[in-house]
Image (cartoon, rainbow, N blue to C red):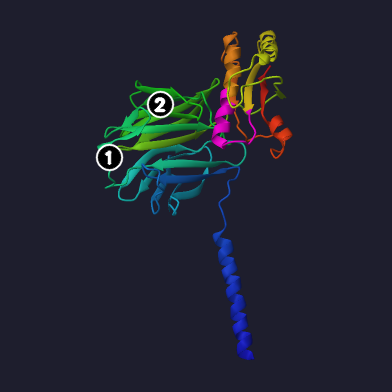
Amino acid sequence: MKQNKLNFFYFLLALVLASSKASFSQQRLIATEEKALVTFNVINLDSVPQSGVRVVYKSTDKKINGEGITNDEGLFSVLMPEGRTFRISIKKEKNIDFGMFKVPQVVGPLNLTQTLRYNVINEKITNNEVSSGLLVANDQTSLVNFKVTDYDSIPEQGAIIKCLAEDKKTKYEGVCNEEGSFDVLLPEGKSYTVSVEKFGKKFDFGELRIPSVDGPLQFSQLYRIRVITNYIEKFILKNIFFETGKADLKKTSFPALNDLYQSMKANPKLKIEVAGHTDNVGSEEANMKLSQNRANTIRKYLNGRGITIDRVTSKGYGEKDPLEDNATEEGRQKNRRLEVRVIEH
């Protein structure tokens, strides 16, 4: 009997220890007001996750430094103080320097993902090139994919990326497409000062260093911005009709558009955002694109009638901000809408 009680005690102890271990392993890092949760995503040129890669970060003031190993999904997460700049590098077969990474300072907790894409040594590269559209990376120039979103991961179409070289004379710049992306070829082994501009606001992201590696390199860089922090007023732009699944306006929409134009003409200080929204029918990507294109159509109409570009911006939110439940046709109809969001008046 005594032996049975002892065995039962050890059984309970084992359960407690197992439970404690499971609880501890499931603990996750949580962003705070002072520290952002940064997840480094290490992949190769074919976007295959790279496990066992050592990610090293060092603050520019040399007060904070650390490192970690990527998991089976190529991920390593760490809490990093907001408003600080870090030099990022990875170590596997060799050391690769990815230059400076600035953690933005925002109101409220912040989660960031930073993609580090590199060429694994001895990986066979067909024709010694990596391409994206019409741009082709080679041994001297890297193909850099910039992506700009807000803090809800919604693309910032129209954002202008500017990369100023170390000589302060050579500049590379371009405008983000409807997916918030802009591709450019940048010479390897050099540093660039990167900034993003949209709707009269400029965001500085510090130094970006393009590493020198064997073979062509495709390099991804994600920047998050908050162009508008507060809206004075929001209202639905009624009686606007599009062709199904398209951004083409129906003629019945022009009276309502003319009213909006007249309001902006009569109030020269009025600045607005045209916000496009969809229901959840179809893919999230397609809905985001459709909402952006429809918002663009309204903006272009106003610009074409003389409302200057510094007074109206457009942004698609896809299915991310529904008014009603998408489970019913009535709800989906209400979610398919355009909003006018007043920024200044």
Amino acid tagged 1 = Thr
Task: Read off the residue under disc 1.
Answer: 126
Q: Residue at x 67, y 29 (%)?
A: 336
Q: Please tell me whether residue 74 is drawn above or below residue 333 in the rendered image.
A: below
Task: Read off the residue under disc 2.
Answer: 163
Q: Position of residue 7 (x, y in %)?
A: 59, 84
Q: Is residue 11 left or right of residue 220?
A: right
Q: Position of residue 89 (x, y in %)?
A: 38, 44
Residue 179, visible in the rendered structure: yes
Instruction: Please identify the quadrant where the C terminus is shown.
Output: top right
Q: Is residue 284 left or right of residue 191?
A: right
Q: Residue at x 62, y 76 (%)?
A: 12
- The local secondary structure at tag 1 comes to helix
- Label 1 to label 2, Cα distance in Å? 29 Å
Query: Which sits in the foreground, 187 or 133?
Result: 133
State yes or no: discs 1 and 2 in contact (Cβ < 8 Å): no
Q: How many marks?
A: 2
Is 300 a magenta residue? no
Query: Which residue is situated farthest in the right direction here?
Result: 330
Q: Earlier in the sequence, mark 1 or mark 2?
A: 1
Q: Position of residue 291 (x, y in %)?
A: 59, 27
Q: Which is more foreground, mark 1 or mark 2?
A: 1
Can you tell which quarter of the image residue 173 is in?
Answer: top left
Instruction: Please identify the quadrant where the N terminus is shown.
Output: bottom right
Amino acid tagged 2 = Cys
Bounds of the magenta span? Answer: 277-293
